[in-house]
Image (cartoon, grey):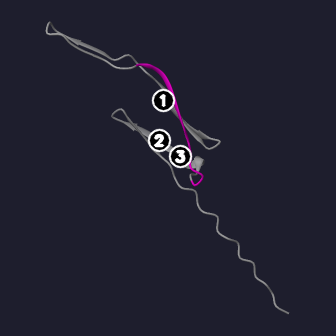
Amino acid sequence: MRVSAENGVLTISGERKLEKEEQGKKFHRIERAYGRFVRSFVLPDNVDPTKVTASMKDGALEVRLVKAEQAKPKQIEISVN
C-alpha cells in the first residue's frame, strides 16, 4: 500500500492478493477482487500536503488531511509627520 500527496493530488495505490476460501463438502466459497489498483483525489486548496498521514488497522485505511494555516494579513505601521 502506498499513499502520496504531491502537486495537489492524493494518490493511493496498492495490490490486493487473491483471497480464496473453500470449505468441506457443503460447499462454501468466497472470492474477492484482486490485483493492482490506483485511486487519485484532488486535494482542496486549504490542505497542507506535507502533513498528510495514513495508517492501516484491521484492513481499513485511514488518511488524515490537515488544513493549512491561513496566511495572516501583514500589518504595516504608518508614520505620520
N-term mark: 1 or 3: 1
Circle 3 Cα neighbour tier, 10 Å, few/some/many (<14 / 14–19 / ≥20): some
Circle 2 Cα neighbour tier, 10 Å, few/some/many (<14 / 14–19 / ≥20): few
Magenta stretch, main secondary structure class: strand
- Is 81 rendered above or below residue 9? below
Q: Looking at this view, is 44 or 5 the one in front? A: 44
User: What residue is drawn where x is 71% and y is 76%?
Assistant: 75
What residue is pinned by disc 1? Answer: 1
What residue is pinned by disc 2? Answer: 54
User: What residue is drawn where x is 43% and y is 40%?
Assistant: 55
- The amino acid on which the numbered mark 3 sits, given as a three-letter code, is Val
Label 1 secondary element: loop
Residue 15, magenta (yes or no): no
Q: Where is residue 29 in the image (x, y as percent from the top left)?
A: 24, 14
The magenta-colored residue range is 34-46
Q: Are marks 3 and 2 in contact (CB under 8 Å)?
A: yes
Farthest residue, direction left? 26
* Image disc number at residue 58: none
Circle 1 Cα neighbour tier, 10 Å, few/some/many (<14 / 14–19 / ≥20): few
Q: How far apart are marks 2 and 1 (CA)?
A: 10 Å
Q: Position of residue 52 (x, y in %)?
A: 53, 46
What residue is pinned by disc 3? Answer: 52
Label 2 secondary element: strand
- The amino acid on which the numbered mark 2 sits, given as a three-letter code, is Ala
- The amino acid on which the numbered mark 1 sits, given as a three-letter code, is Met
N-term mark: 2 or 1: 1
Could you say which quadrant of the image residue 7 lies in?
top right
Label 3 secondary element: loop
Q: How far apart are marks 3 and 2 (CA)?
A: 7 Å
Q: Where is residue 18 in the image (x, y as percent from the top left)?
A: 38, 16
Q: Distance between the residues labelled 1 and 3?
A: 15 Å
- Is 34 rendered above or below residue 76? above
